[in-house]
């Protein structure tokens, strides 16, 4: 197995802790335990035994997760160490060398890289900027062959913050049903909608959907490292078997916290906290973009915690990222990591003060670019 360097993760790992202001995060700004748990809950946490538990996750937590979907129970769920392990289990459990997978891009390219490393043919369905970062379904039809085993989509999308209409979600589900293929949906950003209600899960629309998710991006709880897969029971059992070779047992105290956070009322409270900050910060970012209308454009995100800009300067996105890092001590994410030069990604659910400082420092560099690239 030969894995390509995961450019997005490697970039963040190298630089996010070395700058004064990291304005690249793709998730809702994190909670502290003190903010999340009541005093009574904190006391209960201190009583949790640091022992082994179910390797597929506690029954209580799996039941709580199952309740987020229609007609599911604990056996439809396997708990993972973050959604990253859940995505790993998708590749290990549903694909074999020689299979084909269609990955909707741009995307968090973990599934893409893992599949290629295991000898699986990866085909790309590109979202179209001129279609509002939506797919062209006619192109999807051209990609399918008898070897196609799965379509994988990040929904809502990383990095564009866009998602499919309910009609197009149903259309994609019908397409997969007609071709008898699996539909994997990474729904880690579900719940971070800015202007509309939370859409349904693909797990509620298609019997052969496999959904990966977790407590990180939309919920602002990445440090829990709690993720999950939801799908048909037989296939989830296979994923559990694969998990025995990976992280084995999820952290017991972290599962205790996640079970509290994922209860319906608390989950809605957590998500609304994130949405309120997203709405406020998106207004700041939109005004900033407007001030660069000749040089920067973007489609405001519908969900997620990031904004994806196209800039109109003759400078490579990785070079721009490093100049901002070295000259202004801030980190943005280069579009190159998604295979899209002349784009950058910034986080819009970081503390407002950090966002404003980051934008001011970008101003300093862009002033010099304005004089160079008129």
Image: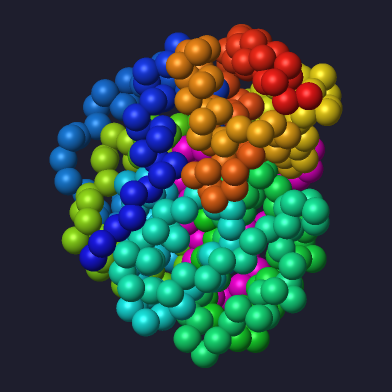
Residue 82: give x, y in percent of width and height: 37, 45
Q: Position of residue 49 (x, y in %)?
A: 19, 34
198 and 132: which is toward the camera: 132
Q: Position of residue 175 (x, y in %)?
A: 67, 79
Q: Residue at x 64, y 39 (%)?
A: 342
Q: Nearer the viewer, residue 169 or 249?
A: 169
Q: Nearer the viewer, residue 66 or 175?
A: 175
| Residue 21 seen from this side | no
Q: In which quadrant of the rendered image does the N terminus lie?
A: bottom left
* Residue sticking out furthest to the bottom: 146
Give the residue at x 59% y 57%: 105
Q: Residue 298: x and y, percent? A: 76, 37
Residue 165, visible in the rendered structure: yes
In the rendered image, which quarter is residue 113 located in?
A: bottom left
Q: Residue at x 36, y 61 (%)?
A: 114
Position of 56 with respect to 313 (left or right) is left
- Magenta segment includes 284: no
Q: Is residue 204 magenta?
A: yes
Q: Give the quadrant of residue 155.
A: bottom right
Which quarter of the picture shows residue 274? top right
Relative placement, left or right, of 2 versus 356 is: left
Magenta span dominant secondary structure: loop
The span picked out in magenta is: 194-218
């Amino acid at each position: 197995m030969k894995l390509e360097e995961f450019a997005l993760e490697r970039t963040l790992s190298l630089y996010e802790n070395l700058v004064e202001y990291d304005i690249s995060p793709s998730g809702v700004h994190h909670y502290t335990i003190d903010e999340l748990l009541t005093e009574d809950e904190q006391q209960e946490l201190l009583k949790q035994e640091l022992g082994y538990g179910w390797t597929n996750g506690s029954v209580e937590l799996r039941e709580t997760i199952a309740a987020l979907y229609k007609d599911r129970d604990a056996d439809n769920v396997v708990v993972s160490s973050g959604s990253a392990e859940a995505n790993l289990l998708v590749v290990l459990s549903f694909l074999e060398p020689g299979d084909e997978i269609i990955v909707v891009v741009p995307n968090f390219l973990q599934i893409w890289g893992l599949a290629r490393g295991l000898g699986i043919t990866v085909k790309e369905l590109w979202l179209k900027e001129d279609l509002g970062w939506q797919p062209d379904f006619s192109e999807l039809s051209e990609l399918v062959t008898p070897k196609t085993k799965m379509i994988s989509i990040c929904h809502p999308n990383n990095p564009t913050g866009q998602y499919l209409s309910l009609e197009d979600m149903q259309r994609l589900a019908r397409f997969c049903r007609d071709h008898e293929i699996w539909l994997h949906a990474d729904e880690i950003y579900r719940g971070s909608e800015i202007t509309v209600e939370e859409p349904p899960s693909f797990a509620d629309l298609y019997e052969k959907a496999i959904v990966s998710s977790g407590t990180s991006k939309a919920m602002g709880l990445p440090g829990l490292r709690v993720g999950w897969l939801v799908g048909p029971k037989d296939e989830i059992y296979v994923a559990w078997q694969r998990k025995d070779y990976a992280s084995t047992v999820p952290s017991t105290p972290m599962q205790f916290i996640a079970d509290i956070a994922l209860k319906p009322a608390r989950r809605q409270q957590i998500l609304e906290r994130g949405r309120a900050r997203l709405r406020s910060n998106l207004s700041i970012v939109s005004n900033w973009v407007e001030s660069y209308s000749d040089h920067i454009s973007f489609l405001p995100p519908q969900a997620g915690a990031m904004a994806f800009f196209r800039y109109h300067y003759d400078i490579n996105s990785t070079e721009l990222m490093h100049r901002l890092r070295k000259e202004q001590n801030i980190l943005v994410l280069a579009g190159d990591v998604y295979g899209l030069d002349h784009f950058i990604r910034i986080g819009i659910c970081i503390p407002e003060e950090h966002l404003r400082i980051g934008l001011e420092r970008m101003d300093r560099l862009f002033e010099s670019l304005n004089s160079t690239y008129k």
